Amino acid sequence: MTTAAPVRTAVPAAVLRLLLPYHRTTGPGSPDPADHPEQLDQIRTFTDAGEPVLLTLPGFPCKSPNPAKVLGHLPDEGERLSLEFLNGLCARIAEVYEPGARLVICSDGHIFGDVIHVPDPHIDAYGDGLRALIRDAGLSHLDTFDLRSVHGDADHDTKRRLVTEAYAPSLDALREQVRADEETARLYRGITRFLVEDTADFTGSRSALQRECRLRAYEVIARSRAWGDLIADHFPRSVRLSIHPQPVGAPKFGIRLLEAGDAWATPWHTAVLRDAGGVARLMRRDEAEGRGRLVRRGGAPSHFEAEG
C-alpha cells in the first residue's frame, strides 16, 4: 500500500506536467500539479484503468466571417500548426504513460453558426478540412466530433434547437451570472469584442453594432455551454480542455494552441505570419499582409512569410 499510493499519484502528475507549460489562465499560473486537483482526478480515471487518457477540446468552429482577419473560410497554416501541436502533446504523454493519449476536437461551429453569421456550408467545409489535415498529416492522436455526429439526419437548425433546449441555460440566468461573477463577465466581454471585430458588413452605427453584439454574446455563451454539456454526456470520462483562459483549479483546463503569447489568439480568428527565422505568429490578416508575402499550399492561401 505504501508503494501503490505514490505511484498512483506520480503518473497523473507526470502527464499533467506536460500540459502545464501551455495553460491558458486568467491569472497567475502554477507549475505544481497539486494545484490542479480536477485535472489530476480526471487523468487518474484513465491511468488507474491502464487506458489511454482521453482529452476533449471544444473549439475549431469555423473561420471568422471578417476577411480582414482571416484568409478564407477553410483551414490553413494556423489550423495545421495547432493540430500538429496538440497531436505532439498527446505523443509526449505516451513517453511518460505508455497507453498514451487521444484528443477529440469537438468542433462547435454549427451550434452557434446562425448567431455568428457563418453559413452552415462554410462550417461543413471547415470541419471537412480539419479531418483532411488530420488524415493527410498522419496526426494519429486526434479525432473530431461535431453537430453532424448527433440527432441523426435532422437539419442543422433542428439540431441546434434540440441541443439548446436540452442543455442551454436561460438567457436571464446567464445575465444574472454575468452581473455576479467576474469570470463570466470577462468571457462575455471577450465574446462581445470578437463579435464586433468579426462583423464586416454592418450598416448601422458603431454603438448600434455594439448593442447587437452584446445581445448575441449571451446567445453564444449559452449555446457554448449547451455544447459543453452535450460533450460531457457523450464523453463522460475525459480531461476537459478549453480554448478560453481558466483559473487555476477550475474544472476545465485552458490550453494554448501554439506558443502564441496572446491568451485569446486562435487560428480561426487570425492568419499566420512566419518571420525571417521561421517562427510562426498569429495575427490579423490585414496586419500580416502588410508585413509579408502570401504563401499558398495546394493552390489555396496558407499563410504569410516576412520579407528578408
Image: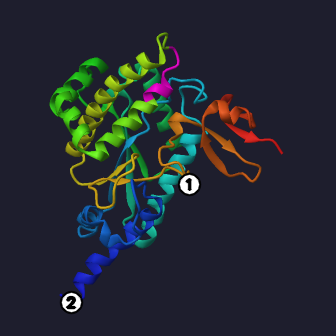
Badge 2 element: loop
Question: In the picture provided, is 257 more to the left or to the right than 302?
Answer: left
| Residue at x 22%, y 22% (from the top left corner) | 161
Crowd class of label 2 (few under 14; some 14 to 19; many from 20; radius 10 Å) = few
* Residue at the limit of the structure toward the top, as seen here: 203
**Position of residue 150 measured from the top left corner of the image (x, y, whole percent):** 26, 31
Q: For residue 259, which numbered disc appears in the image?
A: 1
Name the kind of residue labelled 2 in the image: Thr
- Image check: 154 left or right of 31? left
Find the residue positioned furthest to the right. 308
Spatial CA distance of label 1 from label 2 is 40 Å
Q: Nearer the viewer, residue 72 or 211?
A: 211
**Rendered-image quadrant of the N terminus:** bottom left
Residue 97 makes an appearance in the image? no
Of labels 1 and 2, the one closer to you: 1
In the picture, the disc for residue 2 is: 2
Where is residue 179? Give x, y as percent.
Answer: 24, 38
Q: Nearer the viewer, residue 132 or 89?
A: 89
Measured along the vertical axis of the image, is residue 90 above or below residue 185? below
Query: Which residue appears at 56% of the width and 36% of the height?
Result: 270
Earlier sequence position, callout 1 versus callout 2: 2
Residue 200 within the segment the image draws in magenta: yes
Residue 36 falls in which quadrant of the image? bottom left
Task: Determine which of the numbered discs, if any, sits on residue 211 in the image.
Answer: none
**Residue range corresponding to the magenta coloring:** 195-201
Mark 1 and mark 2 residues within 8 Å of each other at the beta carbon: no
Q: Position of residue 123 (x, y in %)?
A: 43, 26
Q: Is residue 301 left or right of residue 2?
A: right
